[in-house]
Amino acid sequence: MQEVYFALLQEGQTAETGGFFGALGRAAEGFIGLFQAGADTFVGFVTNIIPLLIVLLTAFYTLINLIGEDRVQRVARFAAGTIFTRYTLLPLLAVFFLTNPMCYTFGTFLDEKYKPAFYDSAVSFVHPPLGLFPHVNAAELFVWLGVATGIQALGLPLGDLAVRYLLAGLVVIFIRGLITQYITFFLARRQGVEL
C-alpha cells in the first residue's frame, strides 16, 4: 500500500475525490511535496556545493601553508597600520584567508582601542564576498544562493552582482569601522577608561 501511495505521489496523480477526504489527500500531497523539495535541495548541496566548498577550503589552507603563516601575519600587521586599511584590507584578508569564524583572530594585530571596530568590520564582511569566494562563510552560503536564484530568475548575470556586492561590502565595513571606532573612543573617554 505504501509503495502505491509513493508511486502516485511521484507521478503527480491524485485521487479525484471531493469533500473532506479530497482536501485531506491534497494536504498530504502538499506536505510530502514540501519534504521532497527539501530533499532535492539537500541532494543539490551534497552533489554541488559541499564538494566545491571542500576543494576551496583545501586550496586556501594549502595557499596559506605555501605562503607561510608568518608572511600572512606580517601582511596583516601592515594592514592594521592605517585607518583605511584597518577597516578594509585587514577584514578582507582575515575573511579571505581564515574564513568565518577564525577571521576575528586577526584582531590580535591591533591595539585594544581598535579591536571593537575591527570586529564590527570583520563580522559585517562575512557575507559580501560569498558570490566570489563561497569558502569564506560556507555555513551561510544559503543567503547568497537565495539572492542568486532570484537574480537568475530575472535573467541577469551573477558576476556583476557578486562584484558589486563585494565592493558595497567594503564601503559598508569601512563606514562601520569608523563609526564604531568613534563610539568606542567616545564611551572610553566618557567612562574614564584608558584603552
Image (cartoon, rainbow, N blue to C red):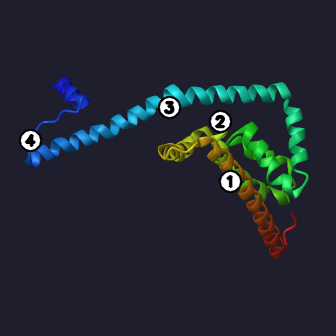
Residue bearing the label numbered 2:
135
Instruction: Specify the amino acid type for callout 1.
Output: Ser
Amino acid of disc 4: Thr
Q: CA distance from mark 4 to mark 3?
A: 37 Å
Question: What secondary structure is found at the residue carrying circle 2?
Answer: helix
Q: Earlier in the sequence, mark 4 or mark 3?
A: 4
Indicate which disc, 2 or 1, sits on the residue closer to the N terminus.
Answer: 1
* Picture residue at 50% right of the left edge, 25% below the top: 47
Residue 148 in the figure: left or right of residue 54: left
Q: Earlier in the sequence, mark 2 or mark 4?
A: 4
Q: How many marks?
A: 4
Neighbour class for label 4 at 10 Å: few (<14), some, many (≥20)?
A: few
| Image height of 88 relative to 49, above or below | below
Label 4 vs 1, first from the N-terminus: 4
Query: Pointer 3: residues within 10 angstroms few (<14), some, or many (20+)?
Result: some
Query: At 79% from the left edge and 42% from the top edge, which residue is drawn?
Result: 93
Instruction: Say which amino acid is labelled 3.
Output: Phe
Q: Quadrant of the C terminus?
A: bottom right
- Label 4's element? loop
Q: Earlier in the sequence, mark 1 or mark 3?
A: 3
Q: Residues within 10 Å of mark 2 (few under 14, many from 20)?
A: many
Q: Residue at x 91, y 52 (%)?
A: 81
Q: Quadrant of residue 92?
A: top right
Say which residue label 4 marks.
17
Would residue 96 be found to the left or right of residue 145 on screen?
right
The residue carrying mark 3 is 45
Image coordinates for residue 133, horizontal then vertical, percent: 67, 38
Badge 3 element: helix
Residue at (56, 29) in percent of width and height: 50
Q: Is residue 123 above or below residue 181?
A: above
Residue marked by disc 1 = 124
How much space separates mark 1 and mark 3, taking CA atoms? 25 Å
